[in-house]
Amino acid sequence: MSCDMFVNFEFFKTGIFNIADLSVTSGMILILISNLAQAQLMDQSEKELIPVKRLDNIATKQENKNLINPTIILNAGKSKFVWNGGLKFGPKTHNGKLRLLNGNINLNGQNISGDVVINMLSLNNSELIGTSSERLVGHLRSADFFDVEKYPTAKLSIKNSKVIEKLEDGKYKMLVNGDMTVKSKTNPISFEAIINLDSDIKTAEGILTFNRNDFDVQYRSEMHLDDPKSFWNKLQTTRDTAKDKVIDEEIEIQFNVVSMPGVLSK
């Protein structure tokens, strides 16, 4: 607590002052009271502005085993997502990264559920540089592909999982089932993952593959080669000559997801 004015309290301890000083002293007392009141208000407001991190619902490692359906929070800074795509009749020559926006996973033994939200505005390219990379990223973010300005997030809603095989070091090979939402289109999806549930920091890694046509991402898709109203017709090309321009419908997402330490109790 601070005060804008310093007052010598020894002056009041002596009790020695005359009538001539009374008006000055009274003024000083009023100023002192005013400053003390303001300082208390400032001190109180500063306390209210300090964020308080609640730890009362964080379970310790020893308590984890006793919790019923605990929840883990995913670490957005350490979780990694890499996309791979390219020509259908050629190598998957393009790749880049996506960032986790937020996520939480509910644990019920070896069965998991929860939501993983991806920031589509973070979509970038890794293998190109300069204007080539900027041009590709701009096109992928456009309405031809993921239209990220209109649909800034994608979501994976995990419904359940099944243990395929128990591995060493507390890891499990699992089949994960859920729904995936891209551009407001939702479709069921299943994929395998290696998940570590026994450590304080949980991890999951694997490859998720989806067909972009299912989510209305159909630019230069093979399914439109015979459609006279498609962009293929605008290119005035035939099926045979267009094959080297067809973009693969399958997009791979390599993920390595990391949780925050500990779990949240219910």
Image (cartoon, grey):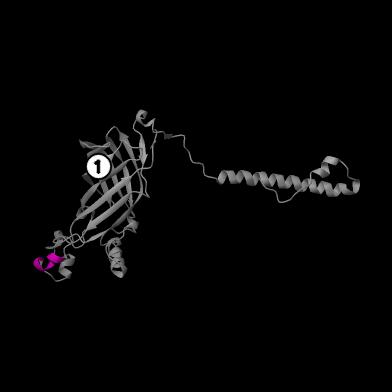
* Residue found at the far right of this picture: 19
* Residue found at the far bottom of this picture: 236
Say which quarter of the image contains residue 41.
top right
Q: Give the x, y percent position of residue 23.
A: 85, 48
Say which quarter of the image contains residue 222.
bottom left
Q: Is residue 264 positioned above or below 88 on the image?
A: above
**Quadrant, the C terminus:** top left
Q: Is residue 171 positioned above or below 241 on the image?
A: above
**Quadrant, the N terminus:** top right
Q: Give the x, y percent position of residue 5.
A: 74, 50
* Residue found at the far front of this picture: 169
Determine the residue positioned at 63% across, 45% down. 43
Q: Amino acid at mark 1?
A: Ile
Q: Could you tell me which secondary element the residue under label 1 belongs to?
A: strand
Q: Give the x, y percent position of residue 70.
A: 35, 34
Determine the residue positioned at 70% across, 48% down. 3
Report how many numbered discs are placed on residues in the image: 1
Label the magenta part by its dominant secondary structure. Answer: helix
Q: Give the x, y percent position of residue 227.
A: 13, 63
Q: Report the magenta residues as a range.
A: 239-244
Please tell me how crowded label 1 is: few (under 14), some (14-19), or many (20+) other residues with Cα within 10 Å: many
| In this picture, residue 56 sits left or right of residue 117 | right
Could you tell me if residue 228 is visible in this image?
no
Determine the residue positioned at 26% across, 45% down. 205
| In this picture, residue 251 sits left or right of residue 68 | left
- Residue denoted by label 1: 194
Could you tell me if residue 3 is visible in this image?
yes
Residue sitting nearer the eye, 99 or 217: 99
**In the image, is residue 46 part of the stretch drawn in magenta?**
no
